[in-house]
Image (tube, rainbow, N blue to C red):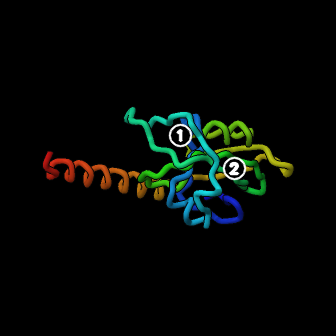
């Protein structure tokens, strides 16, 4: 969980393999934002499967974790993903964070010392199940759709 623009947001993925900080449209709309709040973003974004993602634009918002706040420029994507946002390398570097996928934790310095945020293995499993279920549904739709 992270606080994005004063809202507590669940299902945030910290991904050291992502070159961008990404917000999915369901979170964008849930924050009460509108398309006029977006600025242009012209660089293509490629998914894990190699397909180019259609981008809505970009927006800068404050993200707060354990009392440490940084401005994050999110690329807004209108696509399904079980997480609501991805905090990638730009956020990791801005925070001075050290993520560990093995321990499902991220550590970063704060004025009070080193903060440790623990991930939820249960939530990660739920997101994985949702992604697999969505992919299976998409594959079945392709099989039944006439050409």
Q: Position of residue 119 (x, y in %)?
A: 57, 52
Query: Label 2: few (<14), some or many (≥20) within 10 Å?
Result: some
Marker count (numbered): 2
Does residue 49 sit above or below 120 in this rendering?
Answer: above
Element at label 1: loop
Question: Is 96 located above or below residue 113 in the figure?
Answer: above
The correct choice, above or below, for 46 with respect to 63 in the image is above
Picture quadrant of residue 100: top right
The residue nearer to you, when weighing 131 against 28, is 28
Which of the 4 image quadrants contains residue 94?
top right
Q: Residue at the spot x=16%, y=48% of the render? A: 143
> Percent x, y for residue 114?
77, 46
Residue nearest the viewer, comparing 41 with 9 = 41
Nearer the observer: mark 2 or 1; the answer is 2
Residue drawn 67% across the image and 42% down it: 91
Question: Tag 2, which secondary structure?
Answer: strand
Residue 60 seen in this snapshot: yes
Image quarter in which the C terminus is found: top left
Q: Residue at x 56, y 53 (%)?
A: 12
The quadrant of the picture occupied by the N terminus is: bottom right
In the picture of the structure, the residue carrying the numbered disc 1 is: 102
Nearer-the-camera pick, 105 or 145: 145
**Where is residue 73 shown, x and y percent of the image?**
67, 45
Which numbered circle lies on residue 60? 2
Q: Is residue 16 visible?
A: no
Q: Residue furthest right?
A: 111
The answer to which of marks 2 and 1 sits earlier in the sequence is 2
The CA span between labels 2 and 1 is 30 Å
């Amino acid at each position: 969980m992270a606080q994005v623009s004063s809202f507590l947001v669940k299902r945030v993925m910290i991904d050291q393999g992502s070159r961008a900080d990404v917000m999915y449209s369901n979170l964008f709309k849930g924050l009460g934002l509108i398309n006029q709040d977006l600025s242009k973003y012209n660089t293509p974004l490629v998914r894990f499967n190699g397909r180019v993602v259609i981008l809505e634009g970009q927006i800068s918002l404050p993200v707060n974790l354990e009392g440490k706040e940084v401005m994050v420029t999110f690329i807004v994507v209108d696509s399904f993903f079980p997480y609501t946002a991805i905090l990638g390398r730009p956020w990791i570097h801005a925070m001075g964070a050290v993520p560990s996928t093995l321990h499902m934790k991220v550590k970063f310095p704060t004025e009070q010392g080193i903060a440790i945020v623990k991930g939820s293995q249960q939530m990660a499993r739920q997101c994985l199940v949702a992604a697999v279920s969505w992919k299976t549904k998409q594959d079945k739709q392709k099989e039944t759709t006439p050409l």
